[in-house]
Image: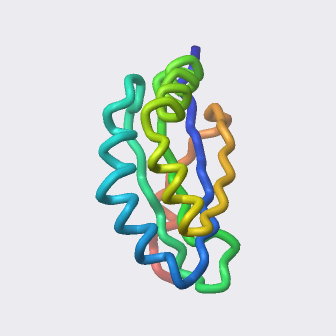
Amino acid sequence: MAPITTIVHFKVPAENEERFFEFWQDHIKDEVGKQPGLVDGVLHRCIDSEGPFQFVNVAHWESPELLATALRQAGEEMPEIAKVMGELGVEVSQNNYVEAVRYTATPESTKPE
């Protein structure tokens, strides 16, 4: 099966953004990193204070089956994460994708006009 990309949007109340970010770095990142099938991931932080999501995590997995296993294990092994997310008022939305089209910058697009 093809590799899969999971994109998770986090809507975080403004007053809890720093606490969420610290919690992500101190707890979530390492726990997710232990999951079999994870290739890599990047947590993005919104630069627009009015944006709908303050954080977006993009992670690549070897297969949909390994992602499903990781999510199941996470639900069983990391109940503390769900508790803290609830306390911080974080809303989570996750979607999974397979690559459809790959593209890169062309030399012409990188030249200043």
Q: Residue at x 54, y 31 (%)?
A: 71
Residue at left offset 59%, top offset 85%:
49
Report the label total. Answer: 0
The correct choice, above or below, for 80 with respect to 78 in the image is below
The spot of residue 36 in percent (x, y) is 38, 23
* Residue 43 percent location from the top left of the image: 44, 58
Which is nearer the eye, 20 or 83?
83
- In this rendering, position of residue 23 left or right of residue 15: left
Please provide percent x and percent y for residue 97.
66, 36
| Front position in the image: 12 or 76 | 76
Q: Which residue lies furthest to the top in this view?
A: 1
Name above or below for residue 72 compared with residue 25: above
Nearest to the observer: residue 98 or residue 12: 12
Relative placement, left or right, of 29 versus 102 is: left
- 102 left or right of 74 in image: right
The residue that appears at 38% across and 29% down in the rendered structure is 35
Residue in front for this viewpoint, 109 or 60? 60
Q: Quadrant of the N terminus?
A: top right
Q: Which residue is drawn at 59% across and 71% down?
A: 12
Q: Which x, y percent locates residue 29?
A: 35, 49
Q: In this view, does 30 lie to the left or right of 92?
A: left
Which color mode does the image show? rainbow
Q: In which quarter of the image is residue 46?
A: bottom right
In the image, residue 47 above or below residue 61:
below
- Classify residue 33 by image quadrant: top left
